[in-house]
Amino acid sequence: MEQTKHLPLSLYGLEAETIAEILSLTKNFQAKQIFNWLVKGVYTFEAMTDLPKAERERLSSLMSSACSSSIHTSETDESGATKMGIRLHDGKVVECVLLVDKKGRHTACLSSQVGCAQGCTFCRTGTMGLFRNLSAEEIIEQYIHLLSASKQPITHIVYMGMGEPLANIAPVTRSIRYFHNPKTFNISLRRITVSTCGVVPGILKLAEQKLPVKLAVSLVSADNRLRDRIMPVNQTWDIMTLKKALLHYQRLGGKRFTIEYCMLGNTNTDEISAKKLASYVRDLDVIVNLIPWNPAEELPYQTPTEEEIDHFTLLLDRLHVNYTRRRSRGREINGACGQLAVPINKGLDL
Ligand code: SF4
């Protein structure tokens, strides 16, 4: 009796040889044709026009080549950000964002989980809780949907969407290797950033891998008591444990990271906060990115005023802190850092 072949949910993440085997293709060059279509952002067999019609029909009846679909694209806002909702095979929805800057960089901001378990109190995703991890295919397909919509090559990737990437490290690193593969998108590892709220075992694991991506560490406060309140992850791995992990990360192969400092109005922008931050980063070879908090009505914070930001940066200048002041992007479409949250996962409709 012929055994039924187990078909994957998606062809993304697979090499041409594996695709040939899965689809029982007798002609190997057809697997390469399918592979090439997939990386061009074409993911329906019907649209793969260099395959014979009968073969396209056979493949379409067998499986679909992608396991997610784009369901909603926001208008691009003034800062050049477009947010997209992606429906997964089980009906869950994640969001991803395409950011286009004046230098012509097209950056895909990808989610790594549906929701997030870390519960950072300044972040909308943190209020959702964790539904589940994303597979590598589901991460790759967010990029594909953004690529299909933009028609422009994507030059940079940041794992800063929904979820904590280092709490789902295996699929995240698999997707990074796929994006970096010269046969797919050939994106330099220096153009890929993984963000973390400070999941120390994940930082140590990433340090061991030959994957010199950029790491962005969300600090928000260099005071344990305040950080305990704002970012519950600090109750497990406090700021000194985090620092030890970062020094280890930096020692292994000179890997670089940035410290992300989300400025919360009247909370972490005073003189004591500046001094604690300066002393924390003194022996780290690092740049601090200052990002004003993006408003989210339901959260108990406020965006700092321009005067407050100016005062804080003046303090950092005096303390010789190496920092950059970041403009918030995607705010108008709720697509900025910490603003992604999808009501459909709680049973509501988009
Ligand atoms: Fe999760 Fe990142 Fe939001 Fe924290 S900031 S709750 S880690 S998505």
Image: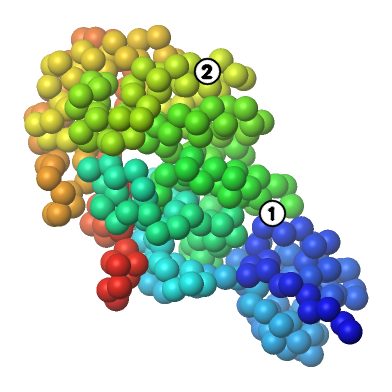
Q: Position of residue 36 (x, y in %)?
A: 73, 64
* Residue in front for this viewpoint, 257 or 247: 247
Q: Residue at x 59, y 45 (%)?
A: 170
In the figure, 313 relative to 261: above or below?
Answer: above
Type of amino acid under label 2:
His
Give, as a three-letter code, the residue at label 1: Thr
Tell me what residue is drawn at x 90 percent, y 74 percent. 27
Q: Is residue 252 above or below residue 72?
A: above
Work out which quarter of the rendered image holds the C terminus and state it.
bottom left
Cα–Cα span, label 1 and label 2: 32 Å
Q: In the rendered image, which quarter contains the N terminus? A: bottom right
Q: Which mark is residue 248?
A: 2
Q: Ligand 1 within 8 A of label 2's CB?
A: no
Which type of secondary structure does the marked residue at label 2 adopt?
helix
Task: Label 1: state its secondary structure.
Answer: loop
Residue 335 rendering spot, x and y as whole percentages = 31, 55
Query: Along the line of sight, which residue is nearer the eye, 324 or 171?
Result: 171
Q: Which mark is residue 184?
A: 1
Q: How is the image coloured?
A: rainbow
Q: Is residue 178 visible?
A: yes
**Residue under the image location 36 percent in, 30 percent down:** 236
Tell me residue 212's x, y (percent).
Answer: 60, 31
